[in-house]
Image (cartoon, rainbow, N blue to C red):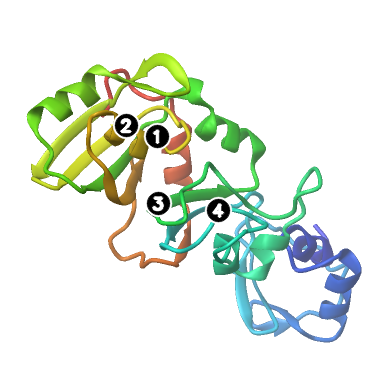
Amino acid sequence: MHLQDILYSQGFGTRRVCAGLIQQGHVSVAGKAVDDPFADLDPEGLLFTVQGTEWAYHEKAYLMLHKPAGTECSQKPSTYPSIYTLLPSPLRLRPNKGAVQGVQAIGRLDQDTTGLLLLTDDGQFIHKMGSPKHHVPKGYEVTAKHPVDALQIDKLLAGVVLDDDPKPVRAAACESDSPLHLRLTLTEGKYHQVKRMLAAVGNRVEGLHRSRIGDLALPGDLAAGQWRWLTAEQVAALRAPAKPGKR
């Protein structure tokens, strides 16, 4: 694969811009500058440096982000900064099919919700992880306004009716380890679902944090606002069908 095409595929600009970066000596491979845009390289596992920034080639981008509070999961935020400003430019400019460039968040978290968010430029992966019919479990840590009692937990597990759908929605798992704290697992993705479910049992969400998607937990060493590549093993595990009865 030509070096200029490698840079282009990773989001470093148009092919002309990428060719210019190479010709001007801003790109190095294995510590040596390469000034030929048409240098033929094997992209698999390739590490290169562009203007001092080291980059690894990824045919498709799969990321996790620890979303901080006060950010919006939108390319065109209305009030708060976009989560996309937390990512380096190449991830936001990767060429993609259709009008939208770069990686896209799989689902959204409210501006005041924190925690695990997945992003990718793989349309099939977005569908797999975001489609309600795949029932991908998502784990939440909920801080409630009022003490959570056994009756509320029973109602959440049995199913509650939300105002826009007569069909009850239920938690796949629910437990409380302190009066104001709830661990909740959902396999659907309705609008403001956690907040509306808590309201339906007479309580209120004061704080919401997504700690897990499928078997992928938010790493304890990934600070709010930081991102990380998913490993091939993590991507494969997320692609795997949900196990019956998995919580």
CA distance separating discs 1 and 3: 16 Å
Is 200 displayed left or right of 82 in the figure?
left
Marks 4 and 3: which is nearer the front?
Answer: 4
Residue 152 position by quadrant = top left
Query: Which three-letter amino acid code belongs to the residue tagged 3?
Result: Leu
Marks 4 and 1: which is nearer the front?
Answer: 1
CA distance separating discs 2 and 3: 20 Å
CA distance separating discs 2 and 1: 6 Å
Residue 196 position by quadrant = top left
CA distance separating discs 4 and 1: 16 Å
Seen in the picture, residue 142 relative to 66 is either above or below; the reply is above
> Which residue is denoted by mark 4 in the rendering?
73
Identified at 31% across, 40% down, the residue is: 139
Do the residues under discs 2 and 1 have CB atoms within 8 angstroms? yes
Dot 3, how many residues are within 10 Å of its Cα: few (below 14), some (14-19), or many (20+)?
Answer: many
> Which residue is denoted by mark 2 in the rendering?
197
In percent of width and height, residue 130 lies at 53, 33
Identified at 28% across, 25% down, the residue is: 172
Q: Which of marks 3 and 1 precedes in the sequence?
A: 3
Dot 4, how many residues are within 10 Å of its Cα: few (below 14), some (14-19), or many (20+)?
Answer: many
Identified at 9% across, 44% down, the residue is: 177
In percent of width and height, residue 37 lies at 87, 71
Query: Which three-letter amino acid code belongs to the residue tagged 2?
Result: Met
Residue 163 position by quadrant = top left
Rendered-image quadrant of the C terminus: top left
Dot 1, how many residues are within 10 Å of its Cα: few (below 14), some (14-19), or many (20+)?
Answer: some
Do the residues under discs 4 and 2 have CB atoms within 8 angstroms? no
> Which residue is denoted by mark 1 in the rendering?
193
Q: Which of marks 3 and 4 precedes in the sequence?
A: 4
Q: Secondary structure at mark 3?
A: strand
> Which residue is denoted by mark 3 in the rendering?
116
Q: Which of marks 1 and 4 precedes in the sequence?
A: 4
